[in-house]
Amino acid sequence: MGRYSLNRRTLLRGAGAAIGLPWLEAMAAPAGGSKPPVRMAALYMPNGVHPDMWTPEGDKRDFKLSPTLSPLADLQDQLMVLTNLWNPGSVGGDGHYVKISGWLTCTTVTKTLGVDVSCNGVSMDQLAVQKTGRQTPIASMELGIAPVTTGVDKNVGYTRVYGSHISWASPTSPLARELNPQLAFERLFRAGNGQADGAKEEALLLDRVLTDAKELRQKLGGADRQRLDEYLSVVRSLEDRLERAASPEQSKWKPRVALDPAAKPTGNPKDYAEHVRLMFDIIALAFQSDSTRVATFLFGNEVSNQNFAFVDGVTGAHHSLSHHENKPDNMRQYQLINKWHIEQYGYLLRKLRDMKEGDSNVLDNSMILLGAGIRDGNKHDPHNLPVVLAGKAGGRLASGQHLSYEKDTPLSNLYVSMLDAFGAPVERFADSTGRLPGVLASS
């Protein structure tokens, strides 16, 4: 078979559609009980942070937010800033790709040009899905802004695909992100308005995807056929779930709040800042309605060179400014970009806080992680990662603290603690050595 040139966008519209549509994981089940569920989201910032503007002053409950974190002052009692965590699995390799793809897996990705992509683990969010994925119509939502970056970064010898993923359902199965807020809203709306009909429509979509994939397979070389076959095995595993989702006994799930169809975004915005906030609106609605309890979001792919001239005081692009070379003006602009990310984080947190649930609110019953796979973008430094966790997880997190640990404490220890708070406890995750002291309300 001769080499076939495949346009990546064509693959995503055809054979890749099921990977890009997380609602195919839908399994409706009764919400059960009146106690609000715990939700979890992980938000990723590319290119690191200004290293001297991130860490708060003080420790435990007596702390002052840093210049970068200052937009969260009114939310300080909901925050947990964690200092001196790192992911040893991301050491070596390259400056960016191993940092992002291993952020939620705490593993070392396989160095490859693209045929045998593997993160060598399952991401923490998907372990949480294994616990709750059958209790909501959407197992998890993976959202982003920029399309998957393809090709090979010849400077480091890695496929650029690694720079576009943080969520992995299996070592070789990164979950694609929905980029269009209108389509993401429509998924939520379908979830809350008739599971059986929605599942039937998705089964028809799956049939079309499989047909397109079979036709595509005939045009590919051996290595690409192998990767496509791995993908199709994942797609086929969804068929029995769709059949059960379409059955009457699987239609008992009900949304905690009704979604207003008038709230649907119109199209895919060209404005980056608006795009980010619309995606955060989607996460908030998904959590409020209990359409899903797990979400991830990428502000941008790693090595993103998004232009931030829309921020006052910034004239350059993100990745370029992250390589600040300790030049004062570059570092000033870099910090302003970091602060903008924190302002958007605050937007989501306040939106969740304003969504009442009995005597509490959705933020009280959630945990929203924000971080990056490197600290100083100029050094590609994986030590002392920028990490902040917001929300109280239904009272299971001891929020309102700055917790500073011994140097190079495993990031995976935080994930063990978060999974415990989520109700999906594990004895060990990746290189973890235990739970992080002070994170859980009972510890």
Image (cartoon, grey):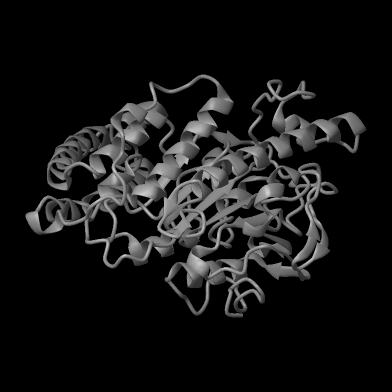
Q: Which residue is drawn at 91% across and 33% down?
A: 327
For residue 361, above or below residue 202: below
> In this view of the protein, which residue sits in the foreground, 360 or 394?
360
Going by the image, does 396 lie left or right of 33?
A: right
> In this view of the protein, which residue sits in the foreground, 12 or 118?
12
Residue 312 percent location from the top left of the image: 75, 23
Quadrant that contains the N terminus: top left
Q: Residue 88 appears in which quarter of the rendering? A: bottom right
Residue 390 percent location from the top left of the image: 59, 56
Quadrant that contains the C terminus: bottom right
Going by the image, does 266 lie left or right of 247?
A: right
View extreme (left): residue? 248
Q: Which residue is drawn at 50% across and 64% down?
A: 393
Q: Which residue is drawn at 52% across and 49% down?
A: 353
> In this view of the protein, which residue sits in the foreground, 223 or 198?
198
**Can I make out residue 5 in this image?**
no
Residue 301 percent location from the top left of the image: 57, 37
Q: Residue 221 appears in which quarter of the rendering? A: top left
**Can I make out residue 256 in this image?**
yes
Number of on-image labels: 0
Residue 209 percent location from the top left of the image: 22, 37
For residue 141, above or below residue 38: above
> In this view of the protein, which residue sits in the foreground, 249 or 172?
249
View extreme (front): residue? 359
